[in-house]
Image: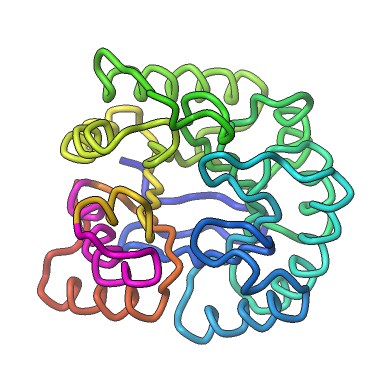
């Protein structure tokens, strides 16, 4: 398994320990923290906090992709994201822009971002070209069945692992064919995106098999509905479950975990590493 992720300013070493990607939602309606950091000043302060807590990467998004959501207007997304990116790139860690729009990708990369994290895997118009135009920018390709507005309306799979793997393989082939070399790409199975509780758990239990795709895995379980279904906890009570899921994801081969609760996850992973458990695979 490759142990380096090439991004615009950083070649990230994925060998010694898992990396923690801190979530910065610049939205009024995200499922977990919508409105908490909707103003640019709040979001910039949150970047500072997550950096101080040990985040290896900051992931900035201006579109809520919670179940039932719809994308904001392009101008709104740009206004949300760009001031925060310009601040975050001064902190000395890689900055990711969580978007599916080519215009936001291009503007974010021009503002100094290092990574594009796309829940739609560069399938929207001109998105692939926008990332290919930057010779070193990293990209995360995620699986999602459908669109956020409807993705949780009775999703169906015959074999969830096989279908997720096939989708990611096809997107990986398309992206590399466009000139984005494999070293720039990580893959995300997309827990909670067009998947029921049963789908999420079946995929999680077999997640390690996705390593056969040949690219590192980025996994996001933080505060998601499946954790609430398993524990009976409301979204604001899911930190312990989220940390547990992050550790389990690493045990099943994840190299990057995307989280809200950076300090707790960083501490848990320090204990994990001290116990000599390291990274799977």
Q: Please, which colouring scheme is shown?
A: rainbow
Asked whether the viewer can see residue 236, the reply is yes
Quarter residue 113 falls in:
bottom right
Q: Is residue 254 above or below residue 165?
A: below
Q: Nearer the viewer, residue 238 or 202?
A: 238
Asked whether the viewer can see residue 211, the reply is no
Question: Residue 181: horizontal and vertical position, in percent?
Answer: 57, 33
Q: Is residue 136 left or right of residue 105?
A: left
Seen at 24% across and 55% down, the residue is 250
SS majority, magenta: helix
Question: Residue 13: horizontal and vertical position, in percent?
Answer: 42, 60
Q: Is residue 173 above or below residue 104?
A: above
Seen at 31% across and 67% down, the residue is 238
Q: Is residue 237 magenta?
A: yes
Q: Is residue 58 left or right of residue 90?
A: left
Q: Residue furthest right?
A: 75
Q: Is residue 212 left or right of residue 92?
A: left
Seen at 84% across and 41% down, the residue is 103
Quarter residue 188 falls in:
top left
Q: Nearer the viewer, residue 156 or 121?
A: 156
Q: Is residue 75 magenta?
A: no
Q: Is residue 267 above or below residue 96?
A: below
Seen at 27% across and 64% down, the residue is 233
Q: Quadrant of the N terminus?
A: top left
Task: Please provide the residue range marked out in magenta.
Answer: 231-252
Q: Nearer the viewer, residue 255 or 67?
A: 67
Q: Residue furthest top?
A: 158
Question: Residue 78: horizontal and vertical position, in percent?
Answer: 84, 53
Q: Nearer the viewer, residue 224 or 85?
A: 224
């Amino acid at each position: 398994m490759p142990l380096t992720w090439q991004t615009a300013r950083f070649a990230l070493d994925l060998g010694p320990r898992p990396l923690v990607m801190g979530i910065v939602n610049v939205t009024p309606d995200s499922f977990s923290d919508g409105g908490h950091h909707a103003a640019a000043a709040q979001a910039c302060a949150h970047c500072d906090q997550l950096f101080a807590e040990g985040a290896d990467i900051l992931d900035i998004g201006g579109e809520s992709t919670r179940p039932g959501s719809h994308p904001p207007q392009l101008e709104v997304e740009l206004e949300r994201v760009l001031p925060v990116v310009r601040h975050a790139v001064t902190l000395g860690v890689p900055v990711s822009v969580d978007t599916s729009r080519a215009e936001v990708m291009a503007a974010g990369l021009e503002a100094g971002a290092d990574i594009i994290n796309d829940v739609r895997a560069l399938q929207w118009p001109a998105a692939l070209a926008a990332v290919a135009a930057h010779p070193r920018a990293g990209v995360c390709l995620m699986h999602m069945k459908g669109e956020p507005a409807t993705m949780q309306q009775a999703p169906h799979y015959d074999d969830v692992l096989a279908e997720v793997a096939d989708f990611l393989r096809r997107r990986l082939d398309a992206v590399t064919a466009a000139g984005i070399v494999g070293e720039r790409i990580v893959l995300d199975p997309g827990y909670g995106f067009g998947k029921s509780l049963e789908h999420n758990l079946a995929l999680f239990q077999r997640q390690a098999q996705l390593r056969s795709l040949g690219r590192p895995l980025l996994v996001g379980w933080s505060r998601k509905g499946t954790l609430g279904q398993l524990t009976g906890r409301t979204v604001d009570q899911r930190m312990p479950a989220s940390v547990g899921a992050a550790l389990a994801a690493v045990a099943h081969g994840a190299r990057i975990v995307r989280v809200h609760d950076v300090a707790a996850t960083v501490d848990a992973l320090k204990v994990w590493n001290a116990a000599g458990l390291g990274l799977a695979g």
